[in-house]
Image (cartoon, rainbow, N blue to C red):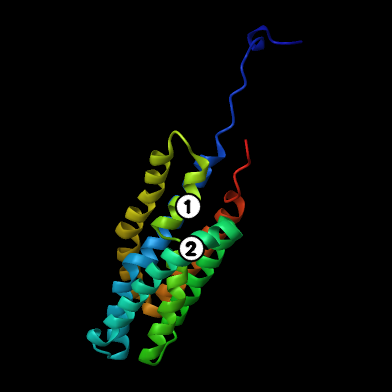
Amino acid sequence: MTNPLDIGAVPRPALYHGWFVVAAAFLIAFFGFGFGFYGPGVYLVALSVRHGWPVAALVPAITAYYMLGAILLFFWVGPLFDRCGARRVVSGGVAAMTVGLVLLTEITQQWQVYAAFAIMAIGWATMSGAAINIIVAPWFDKRRGLAVSWSLNGANAGGILVVPLLTFVAARLGFAAALQAAAVVMVAVLIPVVVLVLRPKEAG
């Protein structure tokens, strides 16, 4: 028998998928900025200590990394998102960032630092602030600014948490173990989120 209290009840609407995209973008920004923007300073010091290389000899690799990332952002990232979609682009970016991080733990010569950072630059370009805007903006019209700003809070969280955690773990387990563990965590968190949440917005 029908409950009289249910008559005329209005079903609650499902949460708009765009907010799940915002949550996913927050995590992308967290790892992207944590490892790709704030992390290089930690890597530079750790590599200098580990191999006995002067910091000044490694600074050009960091400079080249940021320059390459900027070039990729300007000429490549936007068209790539249009052509391949956010799911594929970000998944590829996570893979590139992971490979670059692992390579930093295996290098034995200074030129290899440039190679590792060049691969990481692909990950940084596809997980940066511009990429976050590309991912989130199509899902919102009236509340776009709010959605993008919430997503980019992940960048702040990455800066606050990732560097201290990396330093803490590296001091106890070593630089290589810390970076490899961080790469595993990033893949384990981001790949399922990207695959399940990032999708083209339906028309209409």
Q: Quadrant of residue 170?
A: bottom left
> Quick one: label 1 or label 2, which is nearer the N terminus?
2
Q: Quadrant of residue 155?
A: bottom left
- Name which residue lies at 35% across and 73% down: 67
Q: Give the residue at mark 2.
A: 77
Give the SS element for disc 1.
helix
Please state the horizontal and vertical placement of residue 162, each as a whole percent of the image: 35, 62
Q: Is residue 136 left or right of residue 87?
A: left
Q: Is residue 152 left or right of residue 86?
A: left
Please state the horizontal and vertical placement of residue 146, each as a whole percent of the image: 39, 39
- Name which residue lies at 40% across and 70% down: 71
Q: Quadrant of residue 160?
A: bottom left
- Check the image and name the residue furthest to the top: 4
Answer whether residue 3 is visible to the viewer in this image: yes
Q: CA distance from mark 1 to mark 2?
A: 9 Å
**Residue type at the position of mark 2:** Val
Crowd tier of the residue under label 2, counting other residues whose Cα lies within 10 Å: few below 14, some 14–19, many 20 or above: many
Q: Is residue 131 left or right of residue 57?
A: right
Q: Give the residue at mark 1.
A: 134
- Name which residue lies at 60% across and 50% down: 199
Crowd tier of the residue under label 1, counting other residues whose Cα lies within 10 Å: few below 14, some 14–19, many 20 or above: some
The N terminus, quarter of image: top right
- Name which residue lies at 47% across and 45% down: 137
Please state the horizontal and vertical placement of residue 182, each as a whole percent of the image: 44, 68
**Residue type at the position of mark 1:** Ile
Answer whether residue 171 is visible to the viewer in this image: no
CB of mark 1 within 8 Å of CB of mark 2?
A: yes
Please state the horizontal and vertical placement of residue 83, each as a whole percent of the image: 59, 60
The C terminus, quarter of image: top right
